[in-house]
Amino acid sequence: MIDRISSLPHSIILHILSLLPTAEVIRTSLISKRWRHLWESVPALEFCDVGVEEQELYNFLNKFLEHRMIGKRRLNDLGINRFKLEMQSYGGSSSVHVDRCLSFAVQQHLEELDLHIQPKKIGSVSFFYRIPSFYYCIPSLTVLKLSRFRLDDEVFHNLITGCPSLEKLFLRNCLGLRHLKVSSSNLKSFELISVDRVNSCLVEAVNLQSLVFNLCGSDSQLDLVSCKSVRNLKLNYAHPSHIPSLEVVISELRILESLTLVDFDIDIIQNQYLKVLVLKRTTIEDDDEDEWDDKMEITVNTPSLVSFHYEDVNFTCKVLLNSPNLEEANIKLDYNGVRKKIDMNWYVDMIDFLSYFDCSKVVNLYVYSEENLMFPEKLRKFCRSPLPNVKHLKVETRCELKSESLLRDALLWLSPHTQTLSIRSEENKAQS
């Protein structure tokens, strides 16, 4: 067998090795003499304790650092540009080992740092890893990812000011932050996901292009007034009480291309530049008979929109879509009829809901079962087809199809001028 990889240039081999977990990289030292010390100069380190005892991981880290520092003196080591540490069970008594590992990494002109340190819980006490002070100043850092940390406003401020080159910042499942201020002229991407009890978040980043904001708390407020360069915006729990003048903020983003709103409360989405819109509702509200017709109504004025995705347990929101250039509409209604039976009134609402997507050339429908689209014959006689202008219709059901021919007849009434019609079930697809 020809060893083609060994014939590659040294720099390319190091790049390939940098894509592997460090434990796997070390094993390559057994391949040949040329490979024996290559792992000592790989510019990316990745450690994970999955399937490994805590002390075993620390022993491995200590031994690795010893060899790496020896190799640094012997080889032309260009340093570390990427460091990742994932710990599923961190015990507070061993912070010195993590500190030593991070101290080595941040001295190497580090560019990317990814830390996921899940605290071990003993009784009612959780042992969170606390960031040491040397961590506050990493001028070369461009990407920072922190997950499962306990932070506070002062520590976070020190991190941001000590990393002036930061372009991407990701915070996930972190505790302790209350009044968050992100001020950076270089930041291009910011994700704040499941960060509990943040009272306010002020983002001052004039070059920010992508923002994902997902909070657990219902009282959080987000200020985006100075973020005029955002192209991709995703907001969970997007309510006017959380983001003052949300409708105005969206309309004034002049280069916004993609917008995602999850569990939203907004009356109008207006942006002449928006190309992709995703609306999702994950909460299930009580549907009393008197409230069945009292659905949320949202007007979408987006002349440049080409792709629209709507996902809901049921059609709890009327989407008044004004998007003449829409190419594709994806609609997912995963309603099984348990909370309210599927009757004539339900089908009337369904027809009304679907009629607003007739401006799209392609409609992809995902429903729980074919029953969701089996419009009664009596109704077809008195109601207009809701999708007469749709050219391509694709339907997928979660449950197995029982009568595809009857479903096909109903769909041809639904979209009488469709040029292509596709029907399949997720269950049948999984079986095949």
Image: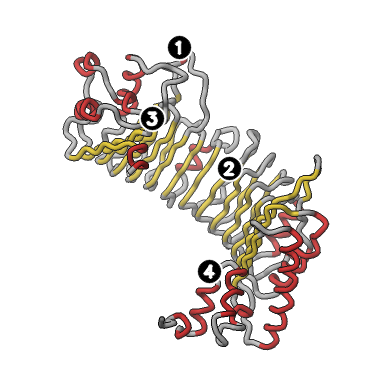
Front of the two marks 4 and 2: 4
Report the residue marked by disc 2.
Answer: 214
Q: What element carries label 2?
A: strand
Look at label 2 and name its amino acid.
Answer: Asn
Q: Judge the density around disc 1: few (<14), some (14-19), many (≥20) Cα neighbours within 10 Å.
A: few
Q: Residue 19 carries which label?
A: 4
Look at label 3 and name its amino acid.
Answer: Tyr
Give the residue drawn at x 72%, y 83%.
70
Q: What element carries label 1?
A: helix
What's the CA distance linking mark 3 and mark 1? Answer: 22 Å
Q: Number of callouts in the render?
A: 4
Q: Where is residue 382 in the image (x, y as percent from the top left)?
A: 21, 15
Report the residue marked by disc 3.
Answer: 368
The answer to whether the residue labelled 4 contacts the one labelled 3, judged by CB atoms less than 8 Å apart, is no
Q: Can residue 13 be seen in this view?
A: yes
Look at label 1 and name its amino acid.
Answer: Glu
Q: Can you tell which quarter of the image residue 205 is in?
A: bottom right
